[in-house]
Image (cartoon, rainbow, N blue to C red):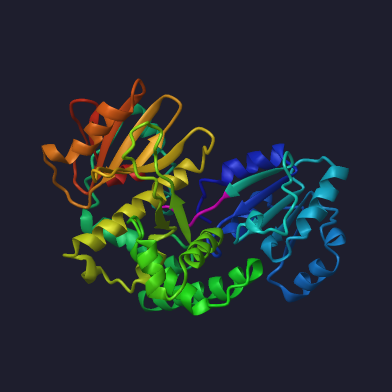
Amino acid sequence: MKKRWQEKGIYEALQIFRVVMLSGARQCGKTTLAKHIVSKDYKYVTLDNPYMLEAAQFDPTNFVKHDKKNMIIDEIQRVPELILGIKIAVDNDNRKGQYLITGSANIYSLPTVKESLAGRISRVRLRPFTYGEIIGNPPKLLQRLKDKDFVDNKDCDKKSIIEIAMKGGFPEPLTLEPQKIKGWYKGYVETLIMKDLSDITNIKRQDKLQKLVEVVAAFSSKFMDKSHVASSLGISRSTLESYINWLENIYITDRLFPWYKTDYERVSKQSKLFMNDTGLMSAILDWKLSDLEYDIDKQGKLIETFVYNQIIAQIDLQPYDVSIYHYRDREKREIDFIIETDDEIIGIEVKSGATFDKSTFKHLKWFKNNLTKDKKFSGIIMYTGEHAMSLSDNMYLVPINNLWE
């Protein structure tokens, strides 16, 4: 089993909280990780099993009772009533680490879930494998950004980075023969819409939702004209918003909020959407490596989404200390990612090319000079080139391999 970056945090949470919830997209490795962490003296049940599902629905309070050190409950969103049963159990017994529950959908998005388990539960997000996890490297990006300690790139040219991104991080496709991968992803999306979404909401137009998945994949990292998309799908704007929310709730896409901590009136407040995995994104869009060789737009969307996936997985490891946003204003100044810590703002622009000139840093420099006020600011151009460079005015040129090296 490959080591997951979240393993240490989950183990520590089990020593502090009575319940730990491990959430993330279906098939990203939640069950394997849960069993690995508790390792022994646990009771395991999965609500994908129809007999267990029926038993849980019939008597949720008794279903969660166990005499082991830990109970793993897989796919808890299928019977939300179990949350109340768990609350009753842990209120009567304050032992730590009694329950490790997993969910392929955000159970707290359901109006029927009234109990938050506040003070009793720690929630952890597990994503598909990052490339660092795949090759067995620890997460170092945030420390590199803090120390400005960047390394050169001698092994990964742009073609290699595109190949890595197109493979993505879902465990099973990484083990399949190339000709079988697309079929796996097609079945995966159908399962999400037909099964996981049906557990938490009543979607009547599943055909529209499946088409929307393709649209979201095509707009990953870009700004979506939602009125146009709604019209092209034949649904209302409000229905489109609801569908996008549900895609977020089953962890197929993420919403990146804008940074607008300023009195500058021309700042855009529109969020961006990112697919949660570039292998999934590439399969949905039916991309081949040859399709991207000379297509700058496709290269840009793929690489920026890939960078987001690698960054957000590392930010997840310390969610209370680091925040991530994007920036855009009406003057068409854009910064792909704004990472904010207690003592610094870091702007990151992603470039699929391997060259740069003086104008490359113009948006980062404008942001620094006009919006950061007294807070320290560093500007990063993350690119597919070879050399890491420190330039004037706290600006840096950083090869993409710093995401995992």
The answer to whether residue 71 is left or right of residue 236 is right
| Above/below status of 101 relative to 348 | below
The answer to whether residue 285 is left or right of residue 133 is left
The answer to whether residue 126 is left or right of residue 149 is right
Quadrant for the C terminus, please.
top left
Which range of residues does the magenta coloring cover? 125-130
Residue at image coords 66%, 59%: 110
Residue at image coords 52%, 39%: 319
State the residue in front, 293 or 196: 196
Classify residue 361 by image quadrant.
Answer: top left
Classify residue 344 by image quadrant.
Answer: top left
Q: Position of residue 102 (x, y in %)?
A: 65, 57
Q: Position of residue 336 (x, y in %)?
A: 31, 45
Residue at image coords 60%, 54%: 23
| Above/below status of 208 relative to 339 | below
Q: Do we see residue 405 in this rendering?
A: no
Prevailing secondary structure of the magenta residues: loop
Magenta stretch holds residue 159: no
Residue at image coords 52%, 77%: 206
Marks counted in the figure total 0
Q: Position of residue 164 (x, y in %)?
A: 32, 59
